């Protein structure tokens, strides 16, 4: 960037003055409310004074600056004169401090209060007064310096920071002229001139050229801030910049401030008039990022006319000349063109200083340096030399230096790391604003966020910060289920010292990691419940749990024995709980399933999905010997809209004895509710069906409304002589599975004690003893069943000699369900009617016969018989053939021929009929009167 300050319309003199007075004000106590540079003069080790040509320099190190205000006084013998900015500019003093308190005070050897011995020896006295916070706390230090300077050019022009000064050797005609004075106006004689030794000689009036002439007497000029005086050999005039009687002029493109005057003075030899002029640059600087170029007109036209040559040309820094090697070491150049003398200074040279600024809260820097030009001209036609010395503080324009954030984050370390720089040494990091609030540097470090300051070359610095991803100041979000984006918005707040100017710099860090571990679900079952375990993933317990269709609430958690800690949760869900579904029901078990779902309620993401299906023991159908059937219907998953309370058996008036939203419990007797009965080879089957049925007045059972739901309830009764316990299972492909229960159907044959059939021989009475031809009353009964539609039919009955029912000889008693009419020991069926013992008469058959013996060749073979029957159980409604048409109902004719005798051979009896039961009596013994008597 190039800043051209040449040929600019702005008032450069004014600019320079403002700059200077701001700096001055920082040093000198003016009674104004301004920030004060702080100095502590307890020791003089930080004070250094020396002489630099026509100047005395006093340097104060910033090490002395400790919380105080400085006042500078000029010491004139016993007098102390407080130097205000205007008095300093009028009297040849200038002061400048850098922001940290390094201060230089220049005193012109022609200054008002300098003790001047013959313009060769100069005693400069300054008192530095330190005022602490407490007004009584004052420290002062006197500095005196004697400078010798005799190589005065006939004209010396000094451009200091706050004033322009010109001094000129006074013409000394001849010694005899001493004491002679020209006639002057007496009324001006009384003006006293500082530095003049009385009215005998001195300046008494002057005319300024602005360029219009303006005449003033000395007193008026002094009141206007000018100095005009004589020393033993020289006439001196001094003007601050930017006064009414100075003017600006552009010289070779460089803005200059000019003051010119004709001075009337009384010299020892008489009254003289001298023309004096000073011209000082107020601009002429050019900037690039790297170089400051300072242009001074080669020919300062207000000062020189005619031709001249440059005898000497020096560059200096801070009022001190540099030699060629010093300049080369620092990269300074001093050159002259036809129009300009040019000084070039690299930006950043150690003779100057950088300073941080924050206009509009943005970080900027400037570089300041104070070069000096010291030139000696000699006019071609006379021996009058002119020394021209310019002290010219230069500060670059504000240079933006937006801090650069370097992202050093290493994902594997799960740590944000940022480096922020570069700053000058006058910047301190105060605090950092995180998403959660502001933390000072100390608080950051205390919380484990390492804040470090790094020193860089050339007094620069940078800062670094490290924050773990898991810190609470880090924001996290998940753009997708397995990815976490960590973000760390930061605002670094800085202060520029010593002014405490704040500025800030935001930095946004972000890192994305595929680091999400999802929760895991496991489960087991026992006979009663599901046991679910959830192990949290990296997101902790920040998920919602669905147990079946229900969201896990605190109440549900209590019902399901929720236990959780920082890493796990567990649930115990009974298999009949609302959260489960029934997949399949079997006669002795139900298969239930529990679905567990973990989801992120914010993003609606499924985080975990688990189901567990187990079979739990449950008898859904029970078949009791007394004919009672019970069935449990459950709402299975495949029929979601079922309302169990509306289920009925085929007879829709048979409703559940108990129901809730998932179960319906039926209990009914086998002869009711539309139960059907079927006979098979080995068993008898009762069946009903649970479903939703249409209303129907026809008495006929209709199809279920919902064909999806049809639960068959079946009971198999296996008929056994004494007892039958059997279970059959008939698988069905459709859900719900058929419910097949089992039962026992017992047929019993007993011998009654008499025809009343009230008392029977019990087991312990056998063998029962009977006389020959004594009636034997048998009763065969279907035990326990209450089904009135069943009929017990005695198909065949016969007697044998031995227990083995197939043994021979045998004698038929009932043949093809009818009495054996060949039998002379006539067999008689006895009707059965209901009574206390007989609930269903068709379940009973009674017959009697007469006791007989088997004989062979008229010899009694054995006095013992066994009676056996084949019984069948029939459906009274069926139109069956054979035995089931009824006891002896099929008889076509009657044979009256009866035979008495012994059957020696029995036909093999068919046993293909499954509902045929075989029953036998115990031994019945013939009481032989012959043998007894
Ligand atoms: C400075 O001191 C000298 C001698 O002590 C005295 O003549 C002169 O008036 C003083 N000047 C001022 C401005 O006080
Ligand atoms: C943080 O520091 C800045 C100075 O850079 C200051 O202005 C601000 O008040 C500080 N904030 C807090 C909360 O301390
Ligand atoms: C910072 O660095 C990390 C790790 O290299 C990277 O993932 C991230 O995108 C970078 N950028 C920002 C703005 O944080
Ligand atoms: C949390 O519970 C699980 C079992 O449910 C156990 O294994 C684990 O150790 C527990 N953790 C803590 C921190 O108690
Ligand atoms: C049949 O037996 C079962 C089981 O013993 C009993 O609960 C039920 O009440 C009985 N039913 C009748 C009608 O006796
Ligand atoms: C009848 O029941 C008994 C006892 O349970 C058994 O031993 C026998 O085999 C059964 N008979 C038939 C025909 O089922």
Image (tube, rainbow, N blue to C red):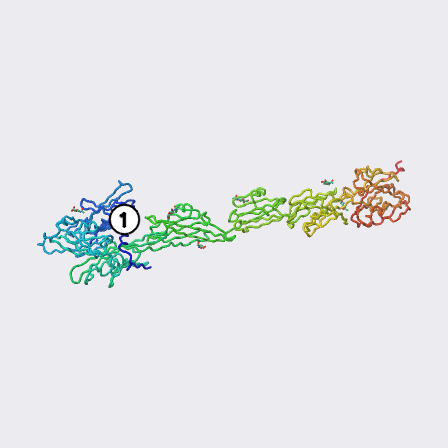
Task: Compare residues 135 and 149 and report the one nearer the observer.
Answer: 135
- Answer with left or right where residue 415 lies relative to residue 228: right
- Answer with left or right where residue 224 lies relative to residue 860: left
Check the image and name the residue furthest to the bottom.
338
Quarter that holds the N terminus: bottom left
- Answer with left or right where residue 705 lies relative to residue 214: right
Check the image and name the residue furthest to the top.
933
Which x, y percent locates residue 484? 49, 52
Q: Does residue 865 sit above or below 159 in this rendering?
A: above
Which x, y percent locates residue 498? 32, 48
Task: Compare residues 176 and 482 and report the one nearer the observer.
Answer: 176
The residue at 54%/51% (across/down) is 605
Secondary element at image label 1: helix
Quarter that holds the C terminus: top right
Residue corresponding to mark 1: 25
Q: Quadrant of ligand 3?
A: bottom left
Which x, y percent locates residue 404? 39, 54
Asked where in the image residue 280 lies, by quadrant, the reply is bottom left
Q: Does residue 614 sit above or below 285 in this rendering?
A: above
**Any part of residue 427 in sight:** yes
């Amino acid at each position: 960037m190039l800043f051209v300050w040449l040929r600019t319309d702005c008032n450069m003199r004014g600019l320079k003055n403002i700059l200077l007075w701001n700096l001055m004000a920082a040093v000198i106590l003016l009674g104004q409310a301004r920030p004060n540079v702080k100095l502590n003069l307890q020791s003089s080790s930080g004070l250094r004074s020396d002489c630099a040509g026509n100047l005395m320099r006093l340097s104060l190190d910033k090490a002395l600056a400790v919380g105080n205000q400085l006042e500078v006084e000029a010491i004139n013998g016993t007098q102390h004169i407080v130097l205000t900015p205007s008095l300093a500019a009028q009297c040849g003093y200038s002061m400048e401090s850098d922001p940290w308190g390094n201060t230089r005070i220049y005193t012109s050897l022609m200054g008002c209060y300098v003790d001047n011995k013959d313009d060769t020896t100069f005693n400069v006295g300054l008192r530095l007064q330190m005022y602490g916070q407490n007004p009584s706390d004052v420290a002062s230090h006197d500095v005196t310096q004697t400078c010798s300077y005799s190589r005065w050019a006939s004209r010396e022009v000094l451009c200091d920071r706050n004033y322009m000064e010109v001094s000129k050797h006074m013409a000394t005609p001849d010694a005899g002229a001493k004491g002679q004075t020209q006639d002057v106006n007496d009324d001006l004689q009384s003006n006293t001139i500082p530095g003049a030794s009385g009215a005998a000689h001195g300046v008494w009036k002057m005319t300024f050229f602005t360029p219009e002439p303006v005449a003033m007497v000395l007193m008026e000029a002094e009141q206007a801030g000018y100095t005009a005086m004589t020393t033993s050999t020289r006439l001196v005039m001094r003007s601050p910049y930017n006064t009414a009687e100075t003017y600006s002029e552009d010289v070779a493109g460089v803005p200059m401030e000019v003051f010119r005057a004709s001075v009337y003075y009384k010299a020892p030899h008489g009254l003289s008039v001298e023309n004096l002029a000073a011209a000082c640059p107020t601009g002429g600087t050019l900037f690039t990022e790297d170089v400051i170029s300072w242009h001074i007109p080669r020919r300062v036209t207000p000062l020189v006319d005619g031709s001249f040559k440059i005898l000497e040309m020096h560059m200096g820094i801070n009022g001190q000349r540099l030699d060629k090697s010093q300049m080369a070491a620092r990269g300074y150049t001093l050159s002259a063109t036809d129009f300009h003398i040019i000084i070039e200074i690299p930006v950043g040279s150690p003779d100057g200083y950088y300073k941080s600024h924050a206009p509009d809260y943005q970080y900027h820097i400037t570089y300041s340096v104070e070069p000096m030009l010291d030139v000696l001209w000699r006019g071609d036609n006379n021996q009058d030399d002119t020394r021209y010395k310019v002290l010219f503080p230069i500060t670059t324009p504000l240079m933006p230096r937006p801090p650069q954030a370097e992202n050093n984050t290493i994902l594997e370390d799960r740590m944000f790391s940022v480096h922020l720089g570069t700053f000058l040494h006058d910047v301190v990091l105060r605090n950092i604003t995180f998403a959660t609030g502001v933390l000072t540097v100390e608080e950051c470090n205390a919380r484990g966020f390492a804040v470090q300051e790094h020193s860089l070359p050339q007094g620069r610095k940078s800062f670094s910060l490290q924050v773990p991803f898991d810190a609470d100041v880090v924001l996290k979000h998940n753009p997708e289920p397995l990815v976490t984006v960590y973000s760390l918005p930061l605002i670094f707040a800085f202060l520029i010292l010593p002014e405490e100017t704040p500025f800030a710099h935001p930095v946004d860090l972000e890192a994305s990691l595929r680091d999400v571990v999802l929760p895991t679900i496991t489960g087991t079952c026992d006979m009663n419940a599901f046991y679910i375990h959830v192990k949290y993933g990296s997101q902790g317990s920040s998920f919602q749990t669905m147990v079946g269709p229900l969201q896990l609430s605190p109440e549900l958690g209590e019902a399901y024995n929720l236990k959780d800690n920082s890493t796990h949760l567990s649930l115990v869900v009974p298999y009949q709980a609302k959260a489960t579904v029934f997949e399949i029901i079997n006669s002795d078990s139900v298969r239930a399933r529990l679905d567990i779902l973990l989801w992120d309620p914010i993003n609606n993401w499924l985080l975990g999905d688990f189901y567990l299906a187990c079979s739990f023991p449950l008898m859904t159908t029970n078949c009791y010997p007394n004919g009672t059937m019970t069935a449990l219907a459950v709402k299975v998953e495949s029929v979601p809209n079922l309302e169990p309370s509306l289920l009925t058996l085929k007879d829709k008036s048979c409703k559940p004895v108990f129901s809730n939203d998932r179960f319906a419990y039926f209990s009914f007797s086998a002869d009711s509710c539309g139960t059907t009965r079927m006979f098979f080879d080995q068993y008898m089957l009762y069946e009903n069906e649970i479903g939703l049925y249409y209303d129907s007045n026809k008495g006929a059972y209709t199809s279920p409304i919902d064909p999806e739901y049809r639960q068959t309830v079946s009971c198999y009764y296996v008929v056994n002589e004494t007892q039958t316990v059997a279970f059959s299972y008939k698988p069905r492909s459709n859900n719900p599975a058929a419910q097949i229960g089992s039962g026992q159907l017992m047929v019993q044959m007993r011998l009654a004690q008499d025809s009343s059939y009230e008392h029977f021989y019990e087991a312990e009475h056998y063998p029962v003893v009977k006389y020959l031809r004594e009636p034997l009353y048998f009763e065969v009964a279907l035990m326990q069943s209450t089904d009135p539609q069943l009929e017990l039919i005695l198909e065949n009955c016969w007697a044998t000699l031995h227990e083995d029912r197939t043994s021979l000889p045998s004698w038929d008693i009932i043949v093809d369900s009818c009495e054996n009419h060949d039998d002379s020991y006539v067999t008689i069926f006895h009707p059965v009617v209901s009574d206390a013992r007989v609930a269903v008469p068709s379940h009973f058959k009674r017959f009697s016969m007469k006791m007989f013996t088997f004989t062979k060749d008229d010899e009694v073979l054995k006095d013992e018989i066994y009676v056996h029957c084949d019984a069948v159980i029939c459906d009274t409604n069926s139109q069956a053939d054979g035995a089931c048409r009824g006891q002896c109902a099929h008889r076509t004719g009657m044979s009256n021929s009866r035979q008495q005798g012994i059957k020696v051979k029995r036909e093999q009896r068919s046993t293909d009929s499954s509902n045929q039961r075989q029953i036998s009596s115990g031994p019945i013994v013939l009481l032989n009167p012959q043998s007894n008597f």
